[in-house]
Image (tube, rainbow, N blue to C red):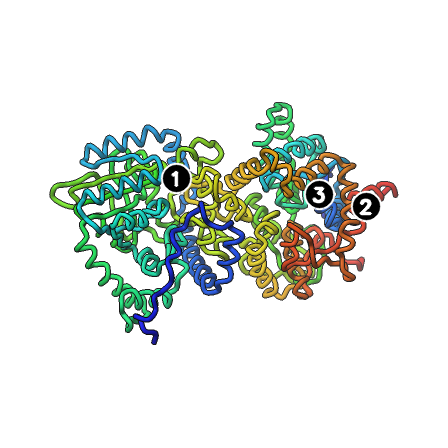
């Protein structure tokens, strides 16, 4: 059997929680996650009845509507060896709010199942750097790229320089750091429409920072921020694209040695 | 040069009042049209933030200090009744007179009465957001008493007939040139220069005469110390010290949340507060006074302890950490929303993230319902808060309260947002419905998609998105459809 040097001795069964908006709007991100995990020798599963973590409802004030979605998530993923989620904000939703929500639901079995499950839930880059201890995942992406640190990844998940270390190990990449890395892009879920003008002003600062890097592409661990940034970059005809970190890490050099 | 006598200056816009303020998105739109204001706010918050970061980073135990600060505040709030009574006892024993005010109206009446009893028709004031909260100046003026603000920033606000936009630096939205114009006009100094020294000299000349003449002072408080009955105020200018020591009568008004159990708690607070507020290791002036002393300082000292809805905040288990706030404004300086709008858009003297949670609660959720939504939940406020108030968490809690209000009763049935949210929640509860909705979404969006595959206009609530952003059309195939197909091919 041929074994890549990247492969781990222990292959994991990884359950992918794609999230509702990635499933609908960014399927390429999901495909890239599958490609990277399989390249590393792990098996990917996709619990078929998964839908949404409930973040939008919860953060907008519709807590009651989010409760059944917590139960649904636990039901779908309780047997997983590891759960990978290509969205920092959805993982932050689970880590920061699910325990309290479960307490409010008041079902001890649900609380117990959640307690076992939550430590096995990882944001995609976090799974690579913290769970697998990897930096080089064998990717190739010969472009000038800048990284946007989403607030939930930065402050709630404490991803630190994990995503940057993954990017630095990509062959061919020309990685440029953005000015004001810790500054919010102004997406904020329903904030982007409820306070459209302030959100736009925040976005304007972020797109200037992106353009100042002269990058061809802006990447992040959250497609929600990227959809917002991309929306302005496209409206302004900048020719700069956005793509999820997984899509960069999925890049491979075609030529074989 | 403009003739000072010819320019009457701006009209008085009246105090910031959450009861009558426009919604945050409306007020923000107006504020964001003021390019000078935005430039001033950006510059000032950048400078203070950088200073704060520098002096916080030099403390090896900064995180432990924050935790200690949180523990002290939490403990105090859990035993607030005990510590308030202890403060009253000890302050009274030291010769102070403690009065209790249920709300702003009662506080104003007490203070106006005390000033009148002091025999003065003027007061000198230290910067106090609590007096701004209760609109004390209007009440004093209505009673024929002239208040003189003596904090430099508050003086600028008062002379400019403006409103405070920041808890620590109320005139943060004004730059040096604008301040010079106000001083030229209001102090009748047409030749005034624009160097900081010129402006400080002008303010000093203007204020010194008041300090020496006015016999009654009004202050707020940073901390009330239960153990000793002492009151603590920290400041940078020394003007506060003048107000605290020169008058014959001193009236302090403080929210009941300002109490600290022990004198030694100041060890933690006086490290956290100046570093977080102004980026200084220590405030230039730290005043602590306990009652009265026959040999020095005011002969008469009153403390007005004011509730004004704080007990209702305390009664809410999920919102009560709001009361832990020590008014450093680090969250305002760190907030990317405040950075764009400045403080006036919040319609309250408490602007920025802390205002977004404090103001609606002080209004018992009857006003300012748009404020909990004035945040992208980025968490920068929580990160810098010296007493670790989880502001994003409280914002979400208050959003829930707003939703409950909006969806109660028959009117709730017609709430567009609530209906959409409930419909989406129903969709997410079933994979089959979710897939159907994904298909429907593609059909529904198709009339809006341009030839290049991008949506440039969206209707209704979603129109905010396409003001400045395009939206890519939905891909033909969802991830789950792709996954299913892949499985079918026996991959």
- Can see residue B116? yes
Residues marked 2 and 1, same chain: yes
Q: Residue furthest right?
A: B489
Picture quadrant where residue A121 is located: top right
User: Residue B261: x percent and y percent?
Assistant: 31, 34
Give neighbour class at mark 3: few <14, some 14-19, many 20+ (Cα, 10 Å).
many
Q: Secondary structure at mark 2?
A: helix
User: Residue A208: x percent and y percent?
Assistant: 58, 63
Q: Secondary structure at mark 1?
A: helix
Residue corresponding to mark 3: A20
User: Residue A185: x percent and y percent?
Assistant: 58, 54
Residue corresponding to mark 1: B69
Disc assigned to residue B482 = 2
Q: In front: B54, or B240?
A: B240
The chain ID associated with circle 2 is: B
Q: Residue furthest left?
A: B295
């Amino acid at each position: 059997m041929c074994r890549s040097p990247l492969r781990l001795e222990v292959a994991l069964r990884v359950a992918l929680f794609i999230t509702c908006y990635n499933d609908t709007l960014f399927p390429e991100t999901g495909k890239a996650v599958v490609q990277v995990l399989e390249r590393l020798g792990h098996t990917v599963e996709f619990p078929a009845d998964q839908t949404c973590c409930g973040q939008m409802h919860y953060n907008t004030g519709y807590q009651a509507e989010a409760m059944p979605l917590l139960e649904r998530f636990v039901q779908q993923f309780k047997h997983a060896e590891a759960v990978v989620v290509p969205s920092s904000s959805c993982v932050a939703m689970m880590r920061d709010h699910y325990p309290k929500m479960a307490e409010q639901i008041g079902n001890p079995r649900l609380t117990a199942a959640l307690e076992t499950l939550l430590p096995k839930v990882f944001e995609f880059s976090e799974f690579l750097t913290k769970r697998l201890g990897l930096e080089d995942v064998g990717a190739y992406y010969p472009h000038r790229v800048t990284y946007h640190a989403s607030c939930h990844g930065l402050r709630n998940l404490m991803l630190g320089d994990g995503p940057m270390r993954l990017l630095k190990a990509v062959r061919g990449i020309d990685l440029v750091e953005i000015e004001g890395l810790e500054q919010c892009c102004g997406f904020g879920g329903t904030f982007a429409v409820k306070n459209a003008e302030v959100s736009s002003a925040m976005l304007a600062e972020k797109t200037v920072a992106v353009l100042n890097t002269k990058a061809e592409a802006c990447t992040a661990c959250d497609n929600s921020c990227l959809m917002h940034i991309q929306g302005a970059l496209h409206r302004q005809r900048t020719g700069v694209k956005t793509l999820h970190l997984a899509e960069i890490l999925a890049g491979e050099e075609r030529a074989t040695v | 040069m403009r003739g000072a006598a010819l320019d009457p200056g701006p009209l008085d816009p009246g105090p910031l009042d959450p009861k009558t303020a426009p919604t945050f998105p409306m007020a923000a739109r107006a504020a964001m049209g003021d390019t000078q204001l935005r430039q001033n706010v950006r510059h000032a918050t950048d400078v203070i933030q950088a200073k704060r970061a520098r002096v916080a980073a030099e403390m090896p135990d900064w995180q432990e200090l924050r935790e200690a600060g949180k523990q002290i505040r939490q403990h105090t709030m859990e035993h607030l009744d005990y510590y308030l009574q202890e403060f009253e006892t000890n302050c009274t024993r030291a010769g102070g007179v403690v009065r209790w005010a249920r709300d702003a109206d009662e506080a104003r009446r007490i203070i106006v009465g005390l000033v009148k009893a002091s025999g003065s028709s003027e007061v000198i004031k230290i910067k106090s957001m609590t007096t701004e909260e209760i609109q004390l100046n209007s009440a004093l003026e209505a009673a024929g008493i002239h208040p003189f603000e003596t904090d430099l920033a508050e003086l600028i606000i008062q002379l400019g007939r403006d409103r405070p936009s920041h808890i620590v630096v109320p005139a943060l939205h004004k730059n040096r040139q604008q301040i010079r114009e106000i001083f030229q006009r209001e102090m009748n100094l047409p030749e005034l220069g624009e160097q900081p020294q010129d402006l400080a000299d002008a303010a000093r000349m203007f204020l010194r005469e008041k300090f020496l003449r006015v016999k009654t002072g009004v202050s707020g408080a940073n901390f009330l110390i239960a153990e000793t009955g002492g009151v603590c105020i920290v400041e940078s200018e020394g003007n506060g010290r003048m107000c605290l020591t020169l008058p014959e009568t001193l009236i302090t008004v403080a929210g009941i949340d300002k109490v600290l159990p022990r004198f030694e708690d100041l060890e933690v607070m006086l490290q956290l507060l100046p570093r977080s507020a102004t980026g200084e290791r220590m405030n230039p002036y730290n005043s602590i006074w306990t009652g009265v002393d026959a040999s020095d300082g005011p002969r008469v000292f009153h403390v007005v302890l004011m509730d004004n809805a704080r007990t209702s905040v305390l009664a809410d288990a999920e919102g009560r950490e709001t009361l832990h706030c020590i008014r450093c404004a680090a969250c305002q300086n760190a907030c990317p929303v405040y950075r764009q709008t400045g403080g006036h858009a919040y319609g309250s003297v408490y602007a920025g993230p802390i205002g977004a949670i404090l103001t609606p609660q002080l209004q018992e959720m009857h006003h300012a319902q748009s404020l909990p939504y004035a945040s992208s939940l980025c968490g920068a406020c929580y990160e810098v808060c010296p007493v670790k108030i989880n502001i994003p968490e409280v914002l979400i809690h208050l959003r829930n309260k707003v939703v409950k209000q909006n969806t109660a009763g028959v009117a709730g049935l017609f709430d567009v947002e609530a209906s959409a949210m409930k419909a989406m929640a129903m969709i997410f509860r079933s994979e089959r419905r979710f897939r159907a909705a994904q298909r429907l979404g593609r059909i529904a969006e198709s009339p809006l998609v341009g030839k290049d595959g991008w949506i440039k206009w969206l209707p209704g609530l979603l129109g905010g998105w396409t003001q400045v952003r395009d939206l890519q059309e939905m891909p033909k195939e969802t991830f789950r459809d792709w996954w299913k197909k892949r499985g079918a091919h026996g991959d």
